[in-house]
Image (tube, helix red, strand yellow):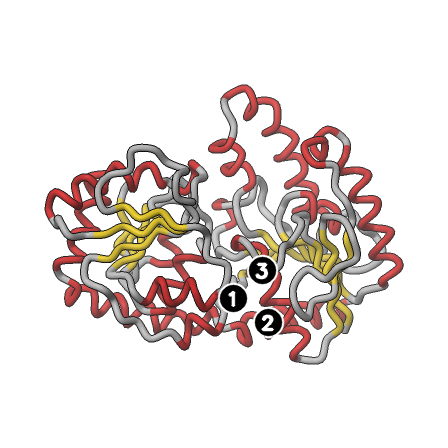
Amino acid sequence: MRVCLVIDSDPGEAPAGGVEKATYALCVGLQRLGHDVVLVAGGHGNHDAWQGVHALRIPASGRHMLLGGARAWSAAVARALTQLRPDVAQGQGLGFAGAAVAGWRGGPSVVSVHGNTLMDLRHARGPLGWAVRAPLVRAQAVRALRGATAVVNVTPNWRVNCPVKPRAQVHIPNPVDEAFFTEIASPEPGSVAYFGGLRRIKGGDLLLAAWARVVAEVPDARLYMYGVPPGSIDGLPPHCIPHATLTSSESIAHAMGRASAVVLPSRYEVTPIVAAEAMTVGVPLIATDVGGVRALAGGVAEVCRIDTAEIAAQIVSAIRAPQTWTGKVAEGRKRSEMFRTEYVVGRYVTLYESILRRG
């Protein structure tokens, strides 16, 4: 079977973010099963995106994509798909990739829904930017949902990340790299890890506000903030250690394994890959009760309100009383089997085969 996966980002040497990680795992998993995979991606040149993954690059027009540039990009994607003649074309996300694939009429199309493009936009732009762009982004998402042969959603509740109900939705979770299954957790007392970077939607500022309360109760606690380059934030609270983004699964898994707790203080999430990775490694997880977090990690994570005092209290609990988290950690390891790449890829193959049987 030939499968073309389409993303609208320009991949670097290593997958960055949940969508690229999921795309890479699916590419590699399909290839291991003997399927022919081509990645259609943004950017310039003919170089492969990631090791062992052949990529065809189609340049995008940057900030002009919402103002007409997406039509030209979609047409270029359609021409590429027509030449490649895949059995199935899949767009990753409800953005430009999903709309381009759903608009292709040369064969069956699948759109995989990951994050929430409207919520990302709401937290990334001011009121004026939101008012101008939101209708365009929503219309694009609706086109993708209504034009696809099938929709794969990483969360079972379509309302978490879709503006309208998909005609045919299949729930398939994101895969987690094998490095997280082989990591043996060895928490360092008082060590807390955050992997959200600087985007407002990830709530790093909420965590920093909570951290002063944590240090007041546990003076030797340390907060490692991955994805926050040193010098990027002025006036950090005591014992906050900024750290550049970790690029390999092995390095992320090792950082998680050293933590007494992993914290996701986000203002919105769908199914955060960091939560699935922390569950797999087997460390206490604290997350705000937003979007699809409870559906993903309820009963495993300590799910709390977007409240700095509550976030701080749960961090202190994880540091001071790790024995109370034993049951939740065990449940997380058990539940993580659904994130294994072989299982996830197998679900996709079953979907593709069912689509092809229906013609």
Where residue 22 sits, quadrant-wise, is bottom right
Please provide percent x and percent y for residue 34.
71, 80
Residue drawn where x is 55% and y is 44% of the image: 162
Q: Is residue 228 left or right of residue 36?
A: left
Residue drawn where x is 73% and y is 68% of the image: 37
Vertical arrangement, residue 30 with respect to residue 100, above or below: below
Q: Earlier in the sequence, mark 3 or mark 2?
A: 3
Vertical arrangement, residue 194 with respect to residue 133, above or below: below
Q: Amino acid at mark 1?
A: Pro
What is the crowding at mark 1: few (fewer than 14 residues within 10 Å), some, or many (at least 20)?
many
Q: Amino acid at mark 2?
A: Val
Contact flag, marks 3 and 2 (Cβ < 8 Å): no
Q: Secondary structure at mark 1?
A: loop
Contact flag, marks 2 and 1 (Cβ < 8 Å): yes
Q: Earlier in the sequence, mark 2 or mark 1?
A: 1
Residue farthest toward the top in the current orientation of the protein = 128
Please provide percent x and percent y for residue 130.
55, 26
> In this figure, which residue is indicated by the disc labeled 2?
345
Q: Is residue 55 left or right of residue 20?
A: right
Q: Is residue 307 visible?
A: no
Please provide percent x and percent y for residue 158.
52, 49
> In this figure, which residue is indicated by the disc labeled 3?
14
> In this figure, which residue is indicated by the disc labeled 1?
175
